[in-house]
Amino acid sequence: MEQFNAILGMESRFWVGQICLAKAYAKQGMYSEALAACDKAWECSGGNSEALSLAGYVHAVSGDRPAAETTIHKMLERSKERYVPPYNLALIFAGLRETETALQWLNQACEDRDVHMPFLRDHKWDGMRSNAQFQELGSRAGFARS
């Protein structure tokens, strides 16, 4: 977090840095800080769906189900006008512990060759690792079964 803050001190509008900082905050359970970084990433990126998705995930894991569900609805509305990666929707459902719905979106992500699939290695998916369908998706995405 110290390194990301140093980078953002040089250029606060570097939205990828804001996303990385948000992920670090979320992993540490610093949810309000993570959401603030997501908001900044959203603003600086011109509305990149990754910022919205990560905010939805943070709302979900912090126990704010209504905010997470509102984010899902926003993303589905956006998808009518522009591409929203299925992985990004799956992430919010994973945060809500809605495994079957998350897997449906991950299947779509795999079919779409969503560039986010390598992030299945991320800690955010740890709760689904023992699921056979999740393991199969990992194999389809090119990861060896463990």
Image: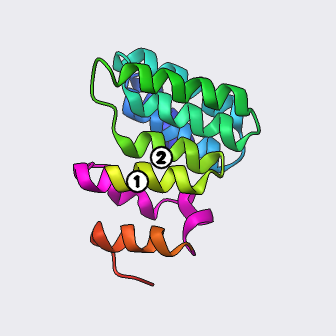
**For the residue marked with disc 1, what is the amino acid?**
Leu
Q: Is residue 41 visible?
A: no
* Residue occupied by mark 1: 106
In the figure, 125 relative to 67: above or below? below
Q: Main secondary structure of the magenta part?
A: helix
Spatial CA distance of label 1 from label 2 is 6 Å
Residue 129 located left or right of residue 79: right
- Is residue 75 located in the magenta-colored stretch of the structure? no
- Whether tag 1 and tag 2 are in contact, CB under 8 A, the answer is yes
* Residue type, mark 2 in image: Ala
Which type of secondary structure does the marked residue at label 2 adopt?
Answer: helix
Question: What's the residue at 39%, 17% (across, down)?
Answer: 44
Q: Is residue 70 visible?
A: yes
Q: Secondary structure at mark 1?
A: helix
Q: Which residue is mark 2?
A: 90
The residue closer to the viewer here, 34 or 116, is: 116
Task: Give the residues in magenta.
Answer: 109-130
